[in-house]
Amino acid sequence: MPVTAEPAAAPSVAAEEIRPVAASAGAALLRQPEAEVTPALNWPELKQQVRDCTACKLRTGCTQTVFGVGDERAEWLFVGEGPGADEDELGEPFVGQAGKLLDNMLAAIKLKRGSNVYIANIVKCRPPNNRTPEADEIATCLPYLQQQIALIKPKLIVALGKTAATSLLGRDAPLGSLRGTVHDFHGIPMIVTYHPAYLLRSPAEKAKAWQDLKFAVQRMTT
């Protein structure tokens, strides 16, 4: 079944286009200083560390950090790019029009936010004007997501959009070339699809996103 959402003139989440990032996130991880994340933090400790983080320039321009939301023992982990205006205000990822579409996408595969699903982003602070996070910002913030993944231990990661996919894979590639394949993130299967904000701007691609979701369900049941 196709996924649908209410029309939106201007999605408030980070508007991610299918375009190369400024530099490979993998290369950035080798060059840039990372936020110091103590191994084996528990959830309260990690949440506090993210709340207090000032390790990159994004923190000075946002209202609050947006940690993530959902079932902390979820089998499904959905990873987007970064918070937008609504997310920055409310402190929860995917709460604008793109969030409504993501909820519809989850419902289409019999999932729902907070039930066996965790939702997070590559960066925890809103980039100015919803621009794509820069390579050094990704490198600085990514260890927080890596710690979340270590705590959740999901059975499958669904990367929503190019920035999420290439940041987790540590290499740049066109989004189209990453779809339809099961990737590996430190032993966890990962599937790539379009960011909901992109689908709002390009509704003709929703059919492809539906194929990706069916592929994800198939992977989880085999």
Image (tube, rainbow, N blue to C red):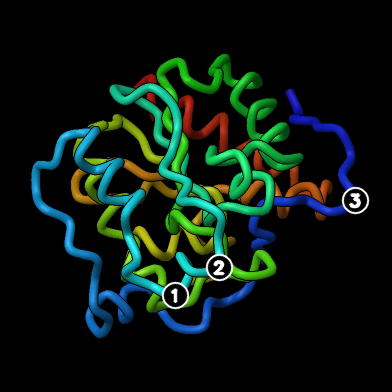
Tell me the residue at 77%/51% (across/down).
Answer: 11
x and y, in percent, of residue 186 in the image: 20, 50
x and y, in percent, of residue 74 in the image: 34, 23
Task: Identify the mark at residue 195; answer none if there is no mark.
Answer: none
Amino acid type at mark 2: Gly
Query: Is 153 on the left or on the right of 190, as rendered?
Result: left
Total count of labels? 3
Task: Identify the mark at residue 61; answer none if there is no mark.
Answer: 2
Asked if labels 1 and 2 touch by Cβ distance under 8 angstroms, the answer is yes
Tell me the residue at 57%/52% (across/down).
Answer: 83
Asked if labels 1 and 3 touch by Cβ distance under 8 angstroms, the answer is no
Compared with residue 159, is residue 156 higher up or lower down, i.e. above or below? above
Q: Nearer the viewer, mark 3 or mark 2?
A: 2
Amino acid type at mark 3: Ala
Q: Quadrant of the N terminus?
A: top right
User: Pointer 2: residues within 10 angstroms few (<14), some, or many (20+)?
Assistant: few
Q: Sequence order check: which comes first, mark 3 or mark 2?
A: 3
Q: Sequence order check: which comes first, mark 3 or mark 1?
A: 3
Front residue of 134 and 124: 124
**In this figure, which residue is indicated by the disc labeled 1?**
57
Front residue of 207 and 130: 130
Label 3 sits on a secondary structure element that is loop
Asked if labels 2 and 3 touch by Cβ distance under 8 angstroms, the answer is no
Q: Nearer the viewer, mark 3 or mark 1?
A: 1
Tell me the residue at 31%/74% (across/down).
Answer: 26
**In this figure, which residue is indicated by the disc labeled 3?**
9
x and y, in percent, of residue 93 in the image: 55, 41
Q: CA distance from mark 3 to mark 2?
A: 24 Å
User: Pointer 3: residues within 10 angstroms few (<14), some, or many (20+)?
Assistant: few
Front residue of 102 and 96: 96
Amino acid type at mark 1: Lys
